[in-house]
Amino acid sequence: MGERTKVAYQAARSGLVGLTRHTASLAGKGKQGVRCNLLSPGVTLTASSLATTTEEWRGEALASVRFPRLGKPEDMAAMVAFLFSDDAAFINGQSFLVDGGAHFS
């Protein structure tokens, strides 16, 4: 999502999307069975984030999410576990937003 600020973050994230696709393409052409996907988490309430943010900030973050709560580390772990599972065996070179619907693309 384009923003007026955070240009370094936006450039780095775009680079990660490109690197993910490049890596998936190289591994796929070699038929090595290696997959590469990108997890893009939204606001995730880790112990560190709870200690360093205010309730007011978390409330503002929640207002931007189309879900009744913010993310938890377990939400990210569940997506990673899915991507490593046989159920995701045909998924390669994709970027997944795990952000409670904060950004629709």
Image (cartoon, rainbow, N blue to C red):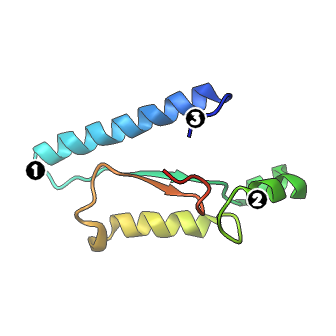
Of tags 1 and 2, the one toward the viewer is 2
Residue 91 placement, left or right of 81: left
Cα distance between the residues tagged 3 and 1: 35 Å
* Mark before the other along the chain sequence, 3 or 1: 3
Looking at the image, residue 11 lies above or below residue 47: above
Choose top left, top right, bottom left or bottom right for residue 56.
bottom right
**Tag 1: residue type?**
Lys
Cα distance between the residues tagged 3 and 2: 19 Å
* Mark before the other along the chain sequence, 1 or 2: 1
Residue at 83% in and 49% down: 52
Residue marked by disc 1: 31
Residue at 62% in and 56% down: 102
The N terminus - image quarter: top right
Q: Report x, y in % for residue 79.
A: 46, 66
Residue 66 placement, left or right of 28: right
Q: Report x, y in % for residue 25.
A: 21, 42
**Picture disc at residue 2:** 3
**Tag 3: residue type?**
Gly
Looking at the image, residue 37 lies above or below residue 1: below
The secondary element bearing badge 3 is classed as loop
Tell whether label 2 touches label 1 (CB within 8 Å).
no
The secondary element bearing badge 1 is classed as loop
Residue 83 placement, left or right of 39: left
Residue marked by disc 2: 63
**Tag 2: residue type?**
Ala
